[in-house]
Amino acid sequence: MKEKVNHSLYEIFKSKDERFDGRVFIGVSSTGIYCRPVCKAKLPKEENCTYYTTPAEAEADGFRPCLICRPELAPGNSKIDSSKSIATRAVKLLEENIVDEGNIAEIANILGVTDRHLRRVFKEEYNVTPIEYLQTSRLLLAKKLLTDTNISILDVAMATGFGSLRRFNEVFKRQYNLAPSHFRKEVKHQNTKGNKDITIKIGYHLPYRYNDILNFLKSRAIDGIEKIEKDKYYRTIRIKKNNEYITGYIIVSNNEKKSAIDLTISDTLLKVLPQVIGKVKNLFDLNCEPHAIYETLKDVNETIPNSFLIGTRIPGSIDDFEICVRAVIGQLVSVKSATTLLQRIAEKIENKANTNIDGLDYLFPTPEDILKIKDNISDVLRTTRNYKNKGKCY
């Protein structure tokens, strides 16, 4: 979508309607920047506004991201009813694999289409090519790291897939007319000396029933792998990259003032940061559009009052294999017994996690781990509470 004149969209911008945050971006010709509809800067004249669906589309027209509303913090668009669902799924894969520029053909293969078809559908849906979208995703993630963290500019360049500091500087200056160091001048970071953890913000659509998500995760937390403490979610994590497992931990907390979650990762996960962000978005359902869902489901409240509350979300998972294992075991025993069983399997495999955080000692087993203990799995099962009563299920 690219629209020069649209009075209804201007009214959305004027009223700062948060329901459209992440779904539309406004380019302002008088300043050369593009904003979120919730931007608190002085309202521009209507004739100076152009409207876009994605940041990539706005940047392709020469606009730079606003330093006040920060488009990189806009919540995702969870559009699922589009006839171009291929393009929507491609966006998710691109954002999680921004380091690999040659992955367009691989993404097309995953989606079961040809490279040419993917490019055509993507262009029709977003008015930019997959490569252009990929570059904008890299730049916005880099801007987020430059603004929110104190990691070196070289590490930012590597983490966002630019390959070299020289190329990073060239692309950044060409796209934004600013040096990457510009975003460090007035930013004060409060990282504790010796603490290498990295914290960034990930935006969401309001309202967000964060405590409901935490309560769900708490009742299913696997001791040693994850825990909830003082309204924060902690867990170990590992991600496979180039046939190597990258391990570390994450800490998630709610930042209500910014309508975002604060995601803290161990420095070991920096090289897979885009994948970590994607997994956390899935786990906490951050791309959910609560108003759109409420409009669809609110009628159930006429049958059972308050049975559906706006802002209710569906927790996802960190790992596809993990959620499959949880689903299978959860069909056989109670939730409590299932988490106990998974804890003991993790202890049996002895994949220790070096976190320096009390209560985070193990990593969730990989498929390879399970295969290694397949002959002894029955011994693990028998040690689980209530196993004798549930034994026939196995």
Image (tube, rainbow, N blue to C red):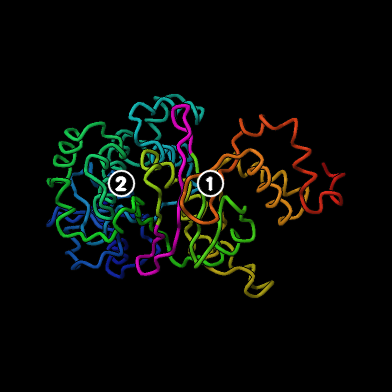
Percent across and percent down for residue 146 are 24, 50
The relative height of residue 133 versus residue 18 in the rendered view (above or below) is above
Q: Which amino acid, by three-letter code, is at mark 2? A: Leu
- Reading the image, the residue beneath label 1 is 318
Q: Do callouts 1 and 2 mark residues in contact (Cβ within 8 Å)?
A: no
Q: Is residue 261 magenta?
A: yes
Which region is colored magenta? 239-262
The relative height of residue 232 versus residue 239 in the rendered view (above or below) is below
Mark 1 or mark 2: whose residue is earlier in sequence: 2
Percent across and percent down for residue 386 are 81, 53
* Residue 381 - label: none
The relative height of residue 110 versus residue 40 in the rendered view (above or below) is above
The relative height of residue 25 versus residue 60 in the rendered view (above or below) is below
* Residue 141 - label: 2
Question: Measuring 69% from the left and 32% from the top, which residue is drawn there?
Answer: 373
Label 2's element?
A: helix
Question: Measuring 45% from the left and 44% from the top, which residue is drawn there?
Answer: 248
Q: Is residue 346 magenta?
A: no
Q: Quadrant of residue 161?
A: top left
Question: Measuring 61% from the left and 42% from the top, which residue is drawn there?
Answer: 322
Q: Which amino acid, by three-letter code, is at mark 1? A: Ile
Question: In the shown orientation, is residue 8 left or right of residue 390?
Answer: left
Q: Quadrant of residue 255?
A: bottom left
- Distance from Cα at disc 1 to Cα at disc 2: 20 Å
Label 1's element?
A: loop
Percent across and percent down for residue 335 are 71, 55
Magenta stretch, main secondary structure, is: strand
Question: In the shown orientation, is residue 56 left or right of residue 263?
Answer: left
